[in-house]
């Protein structure tokens, strides 16, 4: 059941973790309606009047996802939604670290999306199974995980690598939270191996992540494959251009902040190293070349 326009708040706000925990009772997680009065009374109007905090465009994006991927496996929507979510919800990294914002979006703007993406029908209800999909750690919560995946795996203004990385659930479930991916060439090197088909399945991604993590720290990779400094002013300009940019479209990828691309030489340097590490990494079931996990690599533009 979708959220009606009359139920969507005009502006984004904050729902604290304590309020979220209060409303996310076991029965709600198992499909019972969210107690709206408790939720509304616990909402903080924490943001200014800038148009980037308006909820309507964000809600229209979730409406499109629910319609576009109806009848399909919900996992295939991630690679389509992540770049468009990032482009529509224009945040600094500091703002994106606020769990209250993500709680608000999941509970008041798009609870039906969370149930569709993570729920399973049982006894006439959609059971999500984990309250953390509504209110949880940044890499687990249903919506923040996609925003951060786009932030970590974009190459400057190019969201193409995000489509590739979000096409494999283990990139988000495992590699997303690895410290090495705070180093942009490392993140892009992983994407390159996915593009080449060297790393294919969820088990492959897990094996490479473990081998790369054991072989060196972030500091080692920064010395081996240096990155260019990010242009933080470009990010501020991108955030400020929310009123003039086309935030998202159905068929074309949007443009991210033009804060600088990763040097290709650094990506190739690490891609070569990661390929060598992966060749000897212990990967369960490696001999079954065509094996895929339940949420294996699916790339959808």
Image: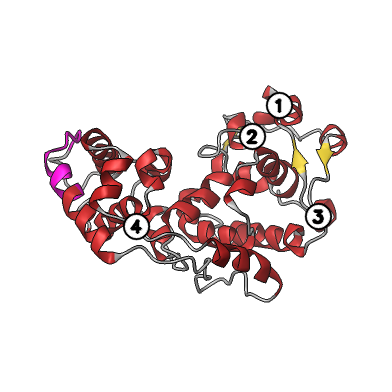
- 281 above or below 4? above
Question: Contact (CB < 8 A) between labels 2 and 4?
Answer: no
Q: Could you tell me which residue is drawn at 17 percent across and 49 percent down?
A: 273
**What residue would you read off at disc 1?**
21
65 drawn magenta: no
Residue at 26% across / 59% down in the picture? 266
- Please identify the quarter of the rendering in which residue 169 is found: top left
Residue contact between numbered discs 4 and 3, judged by CB atoms under 8 Å: no
> Is residue 204 positioned above or below 69 on the image?
above
Indicate which disc, 3 or 1, sits on the residue closer to the N terminus: 1
Label 3 Cα neighbours within 10 Å, binned few <14 / some 14-19 / many ≥20: few
- Callout 4 secondary element: loop
Which residue sits at x=58%, y=72%?
Answer: 249
The magenta region covers: 274-285
Q: Give me the C-alpha separation between circle 3 and circle 1.
A: 26 Å
Question: Would you name the residue on which mark 4 appears?
Answer: 227
**In the displayed structure, does residue 106 sit left or right of residue 225?**
right
Mark 3 touches mark 1? (CB < 8 Å): no
Q: Is residue 294 visible?
A: no
- Image location (x, y in percent) of residue 28: 71, 30
Q: Which residue is labeled 3 in the image?
A: 48
Disc on the earlier residue, 1 or 4: 1
Where residue 17 sits: x, y (%)? 70, 30
Q: Residues within 10 Å of mark 2 (few under 14, many from 20)?
A: many
Of labels 4 and 3, the one closer to you? 4
Instruction: Give SS at disc 3.
Output: loop
Pointers 1 and 2 in contact (C-beta within 8 Å):
yes
Circle 2 or circle 4, nearest the eye: 4
Q: In 3D space, how far apart are the residues under numbered discs 2 and 4 (Cα atoms)?
A: 34 Å
Please identify, in this view, whether the residue under mark 1 or under mark 4 is nearer the observer: 4
How far is mark 1 from mark 2, CA to CA? Answer: 8 Å
């Amino acid at each position: 059941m979708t959220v009606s326009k009359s139920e969507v708040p005009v502006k984004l706000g904050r729902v604290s973790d304590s309020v979220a925990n209060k409303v996310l009772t076991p029965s709600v997680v198992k499909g019972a309606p969210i107690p709206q009065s408790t939720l509304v009374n616990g909402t903080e109007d924490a943001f200014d009047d800038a148009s980037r905090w308006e909820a309507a465009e964000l809600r229209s994006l979730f409406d499109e996802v629910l319609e576009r991927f109806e009848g399909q496996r919900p996992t295939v929507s991630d690679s389509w939604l992540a770049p468009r979510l990032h482009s529509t919800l224009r945040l600094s990294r500091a703002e994106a670290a606020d769990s209250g914002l993500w709680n608000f979006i999941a509970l008041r703007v798009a609870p039906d999306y969370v149930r569709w993406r993570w729920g399973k029908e049982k006894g006439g209800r959609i059971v999500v199974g984990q309250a953390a999909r509504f209110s949880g750690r940044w890499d687990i919560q249903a919506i923040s995980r996609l925003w951060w995946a786009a932030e970590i795996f974009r190459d400057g203004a190019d969201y193409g690598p995000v489509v590739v990385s979000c096409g494999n659930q283990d990139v988000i479930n495992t590699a997303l939270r690895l410290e090495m991916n705070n180093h942009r060439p490392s993140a892009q090197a992983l994407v390159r191996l996915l593009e080449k088909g060297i790393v294919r399945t969820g088990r492959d991604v897990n094996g490479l992540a473990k081998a790369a993590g054991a072989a060196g720290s972030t500091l080692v990779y920064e010395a081996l494959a240096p990155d260019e400094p990010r242009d933080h002013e470009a990010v501020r300009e991108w955030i400020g251009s929310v009123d003039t940019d086309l935030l998202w479209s159905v068929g074309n990828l949007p443009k991210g902040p033009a804060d600088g691309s990763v040097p290709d030489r650094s990506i190739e340097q690490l891609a070569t190293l990661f390929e060598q590490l992966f060749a000897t990494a212990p990967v369960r079931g490696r001999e079954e070349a065509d094996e895929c996990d339940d949420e294996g690599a699916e790339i959808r533009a």
